[in-house]
Structures are given as structure tokens and as C-alpha cells.
Image (cartoon, rainbow, N blue to C red):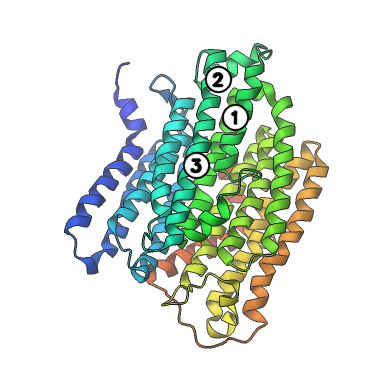
Amino acid sequence: MEFSWMQLMAIAPEMVLTAGACALLLFDLVIPKEQKDKLGYFAIGVLLIACYGSWKLADVETDVFSGMFVLDPYSAYFKVLVYLAGALTILLSMTYLEVERIHLGEYHAFVLLATAGMMVMVSAGDLIMIYLGLELLSISLYTLAGFKRHESRSVEASAKYLILGSFSSAILLYGISLLYGIAGTTNLKALGAFFAQGSLDNPGLFMSMGFLVVGFGFKVAAVPFHMWTPDVYEGSPTPVTAYMSVAPKAASFAVFLRVFAESLGALKAHWQPILITLAIATMIIGNVVAIVQDNIKRMLAYSSIAHAGYALIGIIVGGSLGTMSLMLYLMIYAVMNLGAFGVVILLRKGTLRGEEIADFTGLAKTNPIAALIMLIFMFSLAGIPPTAGFVAKFYVFMGAVEAGMAWLAVIGVLLSAVSAYYYLRVVMVMYMREPEGRFDLATSPATQFALVVTTVAILFFGIYPTPLIDYTKAAILQAP
């Protein structure tokens, strides 16, 4: 294999993130404890440099390293999403880390490494590259989940995530090995060309397809592979929970779609019924179980499971509209869910965790702006206009109707109506109950900036979504 400048340029953003993470670990050794905030701003600077590199490559469409790494508008779109999620997570983390006394540089380094892993995943043109990116992401997340090592529930969350995540990775790897045994390649386009010739009479092929569904289903928290989600989300530090609920889910969906559209498109008649079943079960379990949750992190965990069900509809529909609706949905979901978790982080103060729905009691009277921001995010997650969440759900359900699956859209709309109960319950607690006392928020300029950005984005794209829709349409995956 010959190396060229183009190959180095293609992976330059990933190299910047990795080098930045290593530099953070070194700086953490010498920087005074009271100046640890600077490490967070340094990490954001690294993300901005890498983002600039990805922006310069956004119009490039090429394969490098013998097709193992792909540059195209589709991968560039998801890289923007993970940059955004990484930067917002770091901004939301600064005050939280200080309050929890876990103000360590490793935290920001692992966020950068996780982001690099997701970038490798979304640019992978080969199943081996997907696996490598997934492992870099997963190892970073296992560490971040247990970052509050003085808390048993955080350690438990990390251990549970490690064991179940490793198990699902092994299943995914077994599916990859079976595909290689059948087709003699792990390149996504070569696999697609092989199966397009009609080589579908191998029982092992369907077994490998099932293993891939299990592996990706675990990563996106689809039912019945979702059991890890509530415990890991509840036990992890809240900014990590926010990050896990959007960025890895978006990257996993990006890979899910690329593999099934490019490599297994010829098998759509076989995997589509499986995904329909998963989508319906995921929407039902996610929405129904979320109703009975009193802990807001667990409620948002089941909410994220339900949203994975909506997003699966985009893969099921396929084609230009299905792909566009999935990409649009994931981008909007990332912003609104990070914003919702941002308000939860605001309530973290002293011995009060702010993680129970009861902690929001009377917030509209003690902190009306925080309550209004939370109301906007709850409305958006429920899909109520004029928020961006409504636009996201509209396009997903419209895609199902256009594909002749209006019944699936009806199921989605009905379950979305169910979700309004638990989202509006938070609003009711904030606005219709008297506060039990003064409650000071754990706020900072960084947190305020993150919440302003997410709130404005949700309202702006809810009222005028055309720029985001046009940007998404220009980045649709061109599958054969």
C-alpha cells in the first residue's frame, strides 16, 4: 500500500483529535487545579481545528487506504453532528466536573477520543474499520461512564456497559466474519456488488445479517437490546449521559444505514420485516415504560429508546427520503436532548442532585428562564410545533407514508402522543406546583452559552427549517 498526501489529508481531522487528546493528558499534569477549566477550552479549540479540517474536505468524494476510509458528504454531515455534540458536552461539563470534584483532564481527552472513534465509524468503507472505530468509541465511553469512581452506581454503570458492550461487539464481529467467509471481502461496496449478483442462497448470510442487527441494535438501544440503557444512563455522570444519548447513537445509526443500504441492499426484503418489528417494539417499550419513571435521567433514557424506534423508520423506508429523514432526525434529536440534559445539569447543586422529576417542582417561580428553556426542550422532544422536534418527526412519518407504510406512521404518531404525557409531566411540575424553597442553579457562562445555542437552534429550525433541510438533502448517502 502506497501512502500519499491525500491519504494523510483525509484522516487529518482524526489525527488532530488524537494528538489533542494526548496533549490534554500531558497538560493535565502541569496545570494548577484552579485552572482546570482551561483544559475544557483547549479541548473545544481542538474540536474547532478538526472541524475546520473536515469542512475543507466536505466536498471531496474519494476512497483512500484501498477503500477502507471514505470521504463523502454523508460522512461530513455526521462529523459535524459529532463535533457539535462533543463541544456542547464539554461546555455543559465544566461546572458539573467542578461541583463533583472530578475536574480531571482525562475527561476531556476521552471525549476527544470518543469523537475520533465516531468519525472513523462514519467514514468507514470497510467492516473492519467500522469495528475499529466502534471499539475506540466504546472504550472511551466505558471509562467516561465510570468517571465518578467514588460512587458505586457510576462504577456499576461502567462495569455493566463494559460487559454488555463487549458481548455485543463480539456478536457484531462474528457477523462480520461470517460475511467475509461468504463473500471473501469486508469492503462495503464490494459486498454490495457481490450480493447484487444474486448470491443469496447461503443460510450463513441470513445468520450474519441477524448478528449485525443484534450488534447495531445494541449500539442504538433498540428493543430487545436496550436493557443496559436505563442503568448506564442513570449511573453515569450527567454530561456523559447526555453525550451517550446522542452522539454514539447518531454515529451507530449512520453506520447501520451505510452497511444495510450499501452492502445488504439486495437483502432488503429479508431485513425490512425484522427492522419493522424492532421499530414498533422499541417505540412501544420506550414510550410506555418512560411514563412510570420518577428519575428524569431514566425517563430520558427510555425516551431515547423510543426515539431510536422513530429513527429506525428512516432505515426501513430507505431511499432518498428515508435517508434524509433519518439524518435530519438525528441532528435535531442531538441538539434538543443535549439541551434537556443541560437543564438537568443546571439543577445539580450541593447535595441536591436535580435528577428526580420532583426536583423541578415550582422551577417556573424560582428560575423562570430555566423553566422556559426546559419547556421548549420538552415540547420539542414530544414533537409539538413550532419546535424542531415537530419537523424531525414530520419528515420521518411522511417518509413512511410515501413508502406505502402509512400504518407504521400511524403507530408512530399514536406512540408519539403517548410520549407527550411524560414530557408534559415535567412541564406541569415546573409550572403548576409551588416551590419548596429557593433553589440556586449550578450555572456558568459555558453552560449558559450551550443552552442559548441549543434553544435558539430548536426554535429557529422549528420555524424556518429550510436551511437545515437543504443541507441534509445535499449530504444524502448515495447507495446503489
Q: Mark 3 falls on what kind of element? A: helix
Up-down relation of residue 95 to residue 265 (above or below): below
**Front position in the image: 359 or 196:** 359
In primary-sequence order, the first of circles 3 and 2 is 3
Q: Mark 2 points at which residue?
A: 178
Q: Name the residue under label 1.
A: 211
* Amino acid carrying mark 1 in the image: Phe
Q: Mark 3 points at which residue?
A: 165
**Structural distance between the alpha carbons of marks 3 and 2:** 20 Å
**Front position in the image: 301 or 73:** 301
In primary-sequence order, the first of circles 1 and 2 is 2
* Residue 471 in which image quadrant: top right
Residue occupying the point 57% across, 56% down? 230
| Left or right: where 474 falls relative to 132 | right
Up-down relation of residue 79 to residue 348 (above or below): above
Residue occupying the point 30% across, 53% down? 106
Whether label 1 touches label 2, CB < 8 Å = yes
What x and y, as percent, mark residue 145?
A: 43, 54
Do we see residue 58 in this rendering? no
Residue occupying the point 70% across, 41% down? 278
